[in-house]
Image (cartoon, rainbow, N blue to C red):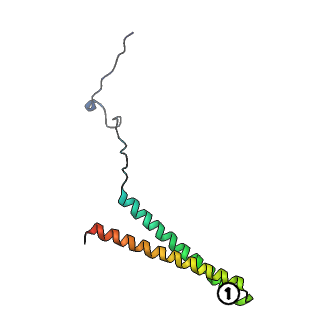
């Protein structure tokens, strides 16, 4: 048994039945994009964490006044410490991001 193949050239096909061959290009790892996204994500998370711990410290301060308990004073100090750490994380991210942008712009 023989195999019969039909040869059709592109010029013979109408525009609706043309086969479009598309190659999926593989995305390459770009370290600049990765660093930028990491810095932005870390900055946003540290700002959110700063806000939440600030609200927690304010609530502990209110409970300390209402109950005059040393427990709430310790909780307030813990929240203020976490707030300080997360805000310093935000500032360090901003400094690192500024350093990379200055390096990229070649000032």
> In the rendering, at what x and y percent does residue 61 appear?
65, 86
In the rendered view, tell whether residue 59 sits above or below residue 98: below
Name the residue at 59% across, 76% down: 52
Q: In the rendered view, would you say 65 is above or below 40?
A: below
User: In the figure, residue 10 lies in which quadrant?
Assistant: top left
Left/right placement of residue 55 relative to residue 40 reads right
Q: Which residue is under mark 1?
A: 62
Residue drawn 52% across and 76% down? Answer: 85
Left or right: 8 in relation to 63 = left
Q: For the residue labelled by badge 1, is the local secondary structure a helix, a strand or a loop?
A: helix
Count of marks, rendered view: 1
Q: Few, some or many C-alpha atoms within 10 Å of disc 1 (few <14, some 14-19, many ≥20)?
A: some
Quadrant placement of the N terminus: top left
Most foreground residue, 18 or 63:
63
User: Residue reaching furthest top?
Assistant: 1
Give left or right: position of 33 versus 9.
Answer: right
Q: Nearer the viewer, residue 95 or 58?
A: 95
Q: Position of residue 41 (x, y in %)?
A: 47, 66
- Residue at x 36% of width, y 72% of height: 98
Quarter of the C terminus within the rendering = bottom left
Quadrant of the rendered image containing residue 19: top left
Q: Residue at x 58, y 81 (%)?
A: 80
């Amino acid at each position: 048994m023989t195999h019969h193949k039909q040869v059709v050239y592109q010029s013979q096909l109408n525009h609706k039945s043309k086969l479009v061959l598309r190659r999926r290009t593989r995305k390459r790892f770009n370290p600049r994009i990765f660093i930028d996204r990491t810095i932005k994500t870390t900055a946003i998370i540290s700002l959110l964490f700063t806000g939440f711990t600030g609200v927690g410290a304010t609530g502990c301060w209110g409970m300390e006044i209402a109950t005059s308990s040393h427990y709430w004073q310790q909780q307030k100090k813990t929240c203020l410490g976490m707030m300080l750490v997360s805000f310093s994380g935000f500032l360090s991210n901003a400094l690192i991001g500024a350093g990379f942008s200055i390096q990229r712009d070649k000032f």
